Image (spheres, rainbow, N blue to C red):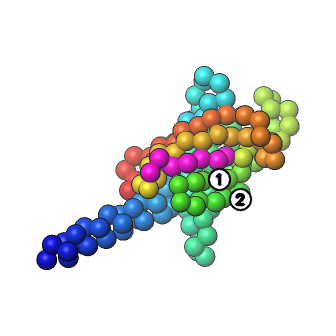
């Protein structure tokens, strides 16, 4: 009986971890180009074919779909087209790379670079929006 109880407890913990890591999920992305904070919204979903897709909303600026989205274990990567505006004289593609804190995928931290370059653009932390999971 003790082995059965232990096995059921382990399966419950494992299934909870797997469920917590699966989209849909919405994150508040706290982005820092310097000491000022900007909060964007990243939404992850699966389409009809079970492919992962994402969308980023940058308040008072733009919104767009993310591309090259990869979620593997505790790593998340994606690109975001950033259109030019009065503060940005040219279109850019930001490349985001992050690690999740643990298997619940509630918190992540990472860096932004320009696609194809290694120089620092911004750092960020993300938090799963309230009420989810």
Q: Residue at 59% across / 37% down in the picture?
A: 124
Residue 51 sits in quarter: bottom right
Which residue is situated farthest in the top direction here?
35
Which residue is situated farthest in the left direction here?
1
Report whether 118 appears left or right of 38: right
Cα gap from disc 2 to disc 1, whole angstroms: 7 Å
For residue 132, say whether it is visible.
yes
Residue 7 drawn in magenta: no
Query: Percent x, y for residue 120?
Result: 72, 34
Q: How many marks?
A: 2
Label 1 CA crowd tier, 10 Å (few <14, some 14–19, many 20+): some
Residue 94 sits in quarter: top right
Query: Percent x, y for residue 60?
Result: 64, 35
- Residue 99 vertical placement versus 88 (above, below): below
Residue 7, labelled with which disc?
none
Point out the image quarter for the C terminus: bottom left
Residue 69 sits in quarter: bottom right
Residues tagged 2 and 1 counted as in contact (Cβ below 8 A): yes
Magenta region, main secondary structure: strand
**Front residue of this view, candidates 106 and 45:** 106
Query: Percent x, y for residue 89?
Result: 85, 32
Q: Residue at 44% across / 56% down in the picture?
A: 103
Q: Which residue position is annotated with label 2? A: 68
Report whether 60 appears left or right of 106: right
**Front residue of this view, candidates 8 and 94:** 8
Report whether 81 appears left or right of 22: right
Q: Which residues are magenta?
A: 96-102
Residue 77, labelled with which disc?
1
Residue 97 drawn in magenta: yes
For residue 40, say whether it is visible.
no
Which residue is situated farthest in the front direction here?
3
């Amino acid at each position: 009986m003790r082995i059965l109880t232990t096995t059921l407890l382990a399966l419950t913990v494992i299934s909870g971890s797997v469920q917590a890591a699966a989209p849909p999920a919405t994150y508040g992305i706290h982005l820092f180009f310097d000491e000022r904070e900007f909060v964007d919204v990243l939404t992850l979903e699966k389409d009809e074919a079970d492919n992962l897709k994402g969308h980023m909303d940058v308040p008072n600026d733009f919104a767009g779909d993310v591309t090259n989205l990869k979620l593997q274990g505790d790593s998340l990567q994606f690109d975001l087209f950033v259109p030019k505006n009065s503060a940005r004289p040219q279109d850019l593609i930001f490349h985001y790379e992050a690690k999740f804190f643990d298997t619940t995928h509630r918190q992540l931290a990472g860096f932004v670079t320009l696609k194809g370059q290694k120089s620092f653009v911004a750092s960020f932390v993300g938090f799963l929006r309230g009420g989810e999971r």
